[in-house]
Image (tube, grey):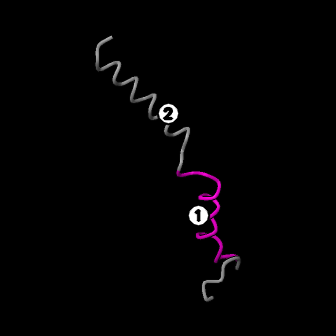
Amino acid sequence: MNKYTILGIIIIIVAIIVLGWAPWMNNQNVHDKIMQEKGSIDGTIDKNT
C-alpha cells in the first residue's frame, strides 16, 4: 500500500469515529432544538413573556 491509500483509510476511520460520536447531537441539544422550532406552534413556549 502506498502512502495515499493509508492516508485515505485514516481519513475514513476518523470520519466514522466523529460521525459515530456526534458531539453536536446529544439528547439535550436535540430537545432544545425541537422546542425552539416547534414549541411556539403548539403553545408550549410563549414568546410574549
Label 1: which residue?
33
Q: Position of residue 10 (x, y in %)?
A: 40, 25
**Number of residues whose C-alpha sits closer than 10 Å to that of mark 2, classed few (under 14), some (14–19) or many (20 or more):** few
Q: Amino acid at mark 2?
A: Ile
Q: Is residue 30 left or right of residue 15?
A: right
Give SS at disc 2: helix
Question: Does the magenta stretch mainly form a helix, a strand or a loop?
Answer: helix
Check the picture and name the quadrant holding the C terminus. Answer: bottom right
The quarter holding residue 32 reads bottom right
Identify the residue at the far left of this view: 3
Question: In front: 42, or 14?
Answer: 14
Q: Quadrant of the N terminus?
A: top left
Residue 6 inside the magenta-drawn segment: no
In-image side of 37 versus 8 (left or right):
right
Q: Residue at x 40, y 23 (%)?
A: 9
Q: CA distance from mark 2 to mark 1?
A: 24 Å
User: Which quadrant of the view contains residue 40?
Assistant: bottom right
Residue ID for mark 2: 16
- Characterize the local packing of mark 1: few (<14), some (14-19) or many (20 or more) Cα atoms within 10 angstroms: few
Tell me which segment is drawn in magenta.
24-42
